[in-house]
Image: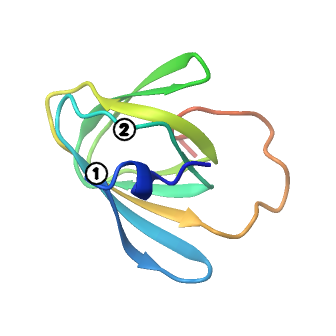
Amino acid sequence: MNDPVIGNPDLYRVVFENERVRVLEYRDRPGDKTTTHGHPDTVMVTLSSFRRRLTAGGRQVDVELDAGQVRWVGAQEHAGENVGDTETHSIFIELKEPAPTAPTGARLGPEDS
């Protein structure tokens, strides 16, 4: 899996890391795009409202989130683009421990639960 911090160092930065988690801060502006990169199972905290387009495996999903939301993001690889008119500011808490069971299906983008 391509590391988002290495592939997009102007957008992602590590703000904390230990043996169990890595915490990333993500910031972009309208029109900014990421290279294809991956995340393990992750908790995302939105610090701003934004609209993004995620692309993976020929599929595209538009995601619109309000500031202050907390979402589960199952492990995935994708590229992203800020397709809104606001800056994106989010925190990603990446889990280093493996999931207790195999995922039930590939999902692109954050989940409501």
Label drawn at residue 93 = none
Which residue bears the numbered disc 1? 11
Look at label 1 and name its amino acid.
Leu
Percent x, y of residue 12: 33, 56
| Side (left or right) of 97 relative to 50 | right
Percent x, y of residue 49: 23, 41
Which residue bears the numbered disc 2? 34
Say which quarter of the image contains residue 62.
top left
At horizontal 63% and vertical 47% (from top left) the residue drawn is 74
Look at label 2 and name its amino acid.
Thr
Within 10 Å of disc 2 (Cα), the crowding (few <14, some 14-19, many 20+) is some
At horizontal 49% and vertical 19% (from top left) the residue drawn is 60
| Side (left or right) of 24 relative to 98 | left
**Sequence order check: which comes first, mark 2 or mark 1?**
1
Q: CA distance from mark 2 to mark 1?
A: 8 Å
Circle 2/circle 1 CB separation < 8 Å: yes
Within 10 Å of disc 1 (Cα), the crowding (few <14, some 14-19, many 20+) is many
At horizontal 53% and vertical 83% (from top left) the residue drawn is 18
Percent x, y of residue 8: 35, 49
Determine whether the residue tagged by mark 2 lies in a helix, strand or loop. loop
Percent x, y of residue 102: 84, 49
At horizontal 81% and vertical 39% (from top left) the residue drawn is 104
Query: In this view, which residue lies farthest toward the right?
Result: 101
Determine whether the residue tagged by mark 1 lies in a helix, strand or loop. loop
* Figure label count: 2
Between residues 111 and 76, which one lies in front from this camera angle?
Answer: 76
In the depicted structure, whether residue 9 falls above or below residue 55: below
Between residues 66 and 20, which one lies in front from this camera angle?
Answer: 20
| Side (left or right) of 12 relative to 109 | left
